[in-house]
Amino acid sequence: MSATPIVSILQEQNVGRDVTVRGWVRTFRSRRFIALNDGSTIHNIQCVVDFEKTDESILKKITTGACIEVQGDLVKSQGAGQAVEVIAKNIIVHGESDPEKFPLQPKKHSLEFLREIAHLRPRTQTFGAVFRIRHYLSFAIHEYFHKRGFYNVHTPIITGSDAEGAGEMFRVTTMDAANPPKNEDGSINYREDFFEKEVNLTVSGQLEAELFALSLGKVYTFGPTFRAENSNTSRHLAEFWMIEPEVAFANLSDNMDLAEDFLRSIIRSAIANCADDLAFLSERLQNEEKQLPANERSAMSLMERLQFVADNGFRRVSYTEAIDILKNSKPNKKGKFQYPIENWGADLQSEHERFLVEKHFKCPVILFDYPANIKAFYMRLNEDGKTVRAMDVLFPGIGEIIGGSQREERFDVLRQKMADFNIPEEEMNWYLDTRRFGSCVHSGFGLGFERLVQFVTGMGNIRDVIPFPRTPGNCEF
Ligand code: 4AD
Ligand code: MG
């Protein structure tokens, strides 16, 4: 007999039926009550064992962490806490687990400790919930674009270009690090390398996505991206996943409309599809925050925060206006910002973004029209000659969740920008070709998938929303 997912048993509550359930033992109480979880839901099913009729050799093996199968009758539960339970008639132990050595004891563990055993943490309630939600978000994103006529493009992971021009790339090579082939002047001879040139892991699929937008109209990528930036923060990973839509004939205002509609739709979809997991995480967060002083607790619960973003529009504010607000803000005047805002042109730090969102506007914000010199070369220059049609979407608790822009579609202006940014034209001729042959207004953005998962799950650290985080000094598993 094949097993039934616990989620279906709990939903259907078809009492009086024979059922088989398979999963991992969370707890075994009084030699009688097994809490079994199979990952299909946050909820366990209770399996009731008659220890007088069960072999001692089997009872001994029902320990936290063991993998078992229970065949029995589904009945209305006698006890409080669950509607139905399985009266076990037969128990098969698939995989024993030494209770002395199993690191996940039925008690609360810190997230830091669980990060060290990232290979076992999906067996906990918290991480089960996080990774189920991560799946639903990914699915909802593909569905959102598919329904609106976007094509998914698989852009390369190994690339010769630095899309963001930030130079924070991981090199890909097959050369012997101890003894690389050299040129006469002592420099490394990449012509001897696998690709016969210097290549890296991609930091963004945008430039390639642009080529496809100017062919297929509306496209998006959803792939891994890599950044060798030495940022040890709760919002940075060296390997993360990014969603990058790119749309022909869309200007910056269309781009903002898309970003806002997209985020709100995905969040609505999470609210609709992940109710149990979100309820669990919302309560978890409230319990965590009880330990904080009252003024540091969130004004809204996780569920309220999600609903708020789903229901309310984002504020659109120009960079210039934001600088005015920040310059005159209390924390700036009182010297509370680590990076004080003095002049127009300053790059905004996470502390400024969070002030605007959490303290000033109290809602998600889209900042646009940034100074050209703090943004990437491909953004469209405004008439003023000093700002570009850039936009960043800022979220409470997260800061920047999306970065995007209208692209520079004019050949001459783009070429000049590349020269200004010291980008060798020979290497980017393929990109310039889109502007040589049938260019048009187009726009796009990049959403950091883990930052979205952070926002939706309320997890404070980005390392807790990706199965195996890669950060400076850490590449376990
Ligand atoms: O703002 P970024 O650097 O923009 C781009 O890469 C553009 N090419 C996107 C585009 O227009 N198609 O990155 C986009 C988003 C950020 O807003 C952030 O959410 C996320 O990617 N991100 C990171 N997430 C986790 N760890 C990091 N180190 C990240 N760097 C960026
Ligand atoms: Mg950015």
Image: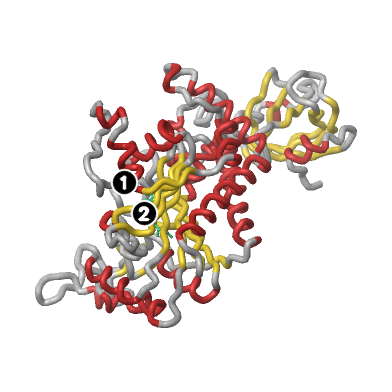
| Residue 402 vs residue 158, the one in the foreground | 402
Residue 42 position in % (x across, y down): 65, 34
Give me the residue at 58% from left, 46% from top. Answer: 264
Identity of the residue drawn at 32% across and 75% down? 428
Q: Earlier in the sequence, mark 2 or mark 1?
A: 2
- Type of residue at label 2? Asp
Mark 1 sits on what residue?
472
Q: Is residue 233 above or below residue 83?
A: below
Residue 300 percent location from the top left of the image: 53, 27
Left or right relative to 363: residue 308? right
Residue 425 lies in what quarter of the image? bottom left
Q: Please report the residue visible at 27 percent of the width from the left and 59 percent of the height from the top.
A: 386
Left or right side of 394 for 259: right
- The residue labelled by disc 2 is 369
**Mark 2 neighbour class, 10 Å CA radius: few under 14, some 14 to 19, many 20 or more:** many
Q: Is residue 357 above or below residue 2?
A: above
- Of residue 206 and residue 365, the one placed in the foreground of this image is 365
Secondary structure category for the residue under label 2: strand
Dot label at residue 114: none
Disc 1 packing (10 Å; few <14; some 14–19; many ≥20): few
